[in-house]
Image (cartoon, rainbow, N blue to C red):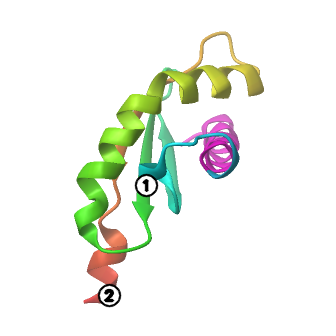
């Protein structure tokens, strides 16, 4: 990744973490951790890896909650970063923590 991609990824990760902590009221999205954000070279797509406290059975609920909040999150990220277009957010469950516990 380029330096600009790295910087923007870090900013988006911080913004999403704050939004999920303070502004999203969906109970399915409590105790969510944004573990990594990867941006494509054109800064049009952000692949976001998330994990949640608790067992892996929450994965379906969390992913459904994120899909429901996706528009709000994208709009708020767009307001806070200085880009012409806000990147499309693509959420993935981060399985690396589960693999690390084994």
Q: Position of residue 32 (x, y in %)?
A: 50, 58
**Quadrant housing the C terminus:** bottom left
Chief secondary structure of the magenta portion = helix
Q: Position of residue 19 (x, y in %)?
A: 65, 42
Q: Which range of residues does the magenta coloring cover?
A: 1-20
Relative to 53, is 56 on the left or the right? Answer: left
Examine the image and state in which quarter residue 100 appears.
bottom left
Q: Nearer the viewer, residue 77 or 58?
A: 58
Q: Which secondary structure, mark 2? A: helix
Can residue 46 be spotted in the picture? yes
Relative to 60, is 17 on the left or the right? Answer: right
Q: Position of residue 92 (x, y in %)?
A: 33, 47
Q: Which secondary structure, mark 1? A: strand
Relative to 59, is 23 on the left or the right? Answer: right
Sort mark 1 into few (<14), some (14-19) or many (20+) by Cα contacts within 10 Å. many
Is residue 14 a member of the stretch shown in magenta? Answer: yes
Can residue 45 be spotted in the picture? no
Label 1, label 2: how far apart the Cα atoms are: 16 Å
Is residue 2 a member of the stretch shown in magenta? Answer: yes
User: Residue drawn 35% across and 60% down?
Assistant: 94
Eyeballing the image, is 32 above or below 97? above
Circle on res. 101: 2
Q: Position of residue 76 (x, y in %)?
A: 66, 25
Give whichever of discs 1 and 2 has the lower sequence position. 1
Q: Nearer the viewer, residue 57 or 25?
A: 25
**Mark 1, residue position:** 50
Eyeballing the image, is 87 above or below 23? above
The residue at the far top in this view is 84
């Amino acid at each position: 990744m380029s330096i600009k991609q790295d910087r923007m990824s870090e900013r988006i990760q911080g913004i999403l973490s704050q939004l999920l902590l303070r502004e999203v009221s969906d109970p399915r999205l409590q105790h969510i951790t944004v573990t990594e954000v990867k941006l494509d070279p054109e800064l049009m797509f952000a692949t976001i890896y998330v994990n949640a406290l608790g067992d892996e059975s929450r994965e379906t609920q969390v992913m459904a909650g994120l899909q429901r909040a996706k528009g709000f999150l994208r709009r708020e990220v767009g307001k806070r970063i200085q880009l012409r277009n806000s990147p499309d957010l693509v959420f993935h469950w981060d399985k690396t923590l589960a693999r690390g516990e084994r």
